[in-house]
Amino acid sequence: MPTGLGRRASELGEREDFVDVNVEEPHHGRKRSISLPAAAQAARWREAMAREEAQASTSSSTPAEKTPAISRVSPELLTTIFTFAARRDIVSLARVSRTFSQAALSALYDDLDLRDVDDERAAQCIASLASRRPLAALVRHFACRTLPEDASSLDTVTFAIAFNNMERLRALTLPRFDLRLLSHTTFALERLTLLCKNISAQEFHALFAWLARHPSLAVLSLPKLVLNDLPPPVDAGTPTPPHTPRTPDTPTHDSNALASSSSSSSSSPSPSPCDSTIPDTVLPNLRRVHAPAAIAGALAASGQRPLESAKILIQNTLYDGLRPSAIMGALAAARGTLRTLTIKPASARIDARTLERVVMAAGAELGGFVETLEVHWVLDDESLYKLMASALGRFRALRTLRLLRDSPPPFPPSPLLEFPLPPASPPLSAGPGNRNSISSFSSAFPPPRSARSAGAADTPFPRVHERAHLGLWSKTCPSLRHVFFLSGAEWNVLQLSPSEAAFGFGGTPFEFVGYTQL
């Protein structure tokens, strides 16, 4: 046997010490032995990883516990909450913190109405919007009472810059249209209201040329404009000034001009409202219009706009050349979408015969699809009720009838013929829609015990009078479901049980709901 080839195991054991450490394998059931330095290093690694995981979990949970709950509310929700506060309180909220400041500024400048502000403070606000573009970008609804007159003044430049900074503007209310201030704007309007009484031909065409840049406009309101016919188109050879001058609201009283205009109007026929000078590509998404009959008819005549509601202003009489059939015939082109019609006389000089012809023409042309009819009245009540009795038969799809009075009724010829009316200012209740509770009225107008069982002896005389009209109207217009009288009384169709419906009534039964302030 060879010698000198190695050492005995006993000698190796004397020089090197071995420590058996049992380590469990994660995937095997057997145990193995490793040296002490490797086991200690693995233990230190596990402890370090455990400490890092503990620190990470602690750091992720600490900010949520230390951050106030109000700071976790979204700015959009804060802005919505702040809009219900008074403007003075919103200014105070803007000074609380940075989070509150941004939400309060959004609530403060979202709806900016300067019509009730004096001229000096309004000028300061416009200057602030012109110099601070981020602040002007918060404005979505803007209204003002006056605009600068001088084209070369600093106020005109300031207004133009302020309008140009309102890039998120959606609703605009101005006393008149001024192309100098709005020619360079970049916002996309959805609602436009102009409160001017007169407009020149150049301003009219400049207005609709500017509106062609706002295809998303859905509501156009010209509630005070006096315009019997559409202005003729401007001659292409005549240069139009870039800044159209303002036409005063008060018409001129030049006798020569009146004589020439009267002679020309007598010699030439009046243009039809259907002869539209408004291109079909202008206002393609218009849904509601409140304007003189000529403009409303011109906008609806093409049938290309999804017009849902039309509020027409009657500004002249039959003797002045008004043609109700032509106006309603133009509105009939929107039969696919038009569902609400409002007829409003511009003044008390509009006689009963003119209004009767307008309502009868509306029933003949629009009665097959109009579901809501609203009539503003300036004459005595009985004239309107007689008109409704003869005209409602033409409205075959009518469901809601609103009769409103914008001015006090005329003085009755005899006090004995005047029916008593409900209180002018009844106490308000907490019901929805600002509706006065029936129980809140004085004992002079006690409510009936039940709309089904109350007889004439239990109902005050004004409501007996209204019930008589409803009985006649429901026979001529069976689709009628809601009626609002000039007195403010609201009546709805009574919901009958199957047994009551089988028993039958003489007409559609109505029940008194209450007095509503529309």
Image: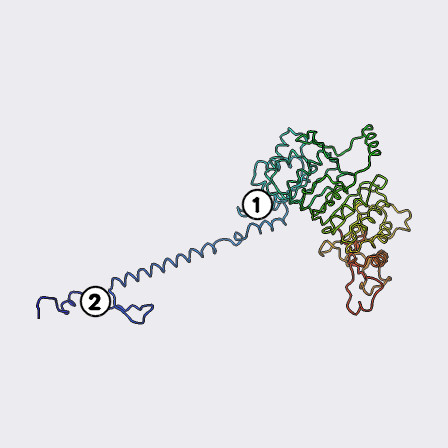
**Rendered residue at 58%/46% (across/down):** 104
Q: Nearer the viewer, residue 251 or 358?
A: 358
Q: Quadrant of residue 212?
A: top right
Q: Which residue is mark 2?
A: 18
The amino acid at mark 2 is Phe
Of 148 and 189, nearer the camera is 189
Q: Looking at the image, which residue sits at the far bottom?
A: 29
Distance of label 1 from label 2 (alpha carbons): 75 Å
Could you say where residue 170 lies in the image, as x and y percent from the top left?
Answer: 63, 44
The residue at 47%/54% (across/down) is 66
Quarter of the view holding residue 515: bottom right
Label disc, if present, on residue 479 of the rendered structure:
none
* Rendered view: 9 above or below 169: below
The picture places residue 391, in percent across and down from the top left corner, at: 84, 52
Q: Which mark is residue 94?
A: 1
Mark 2: secondary structure: loop
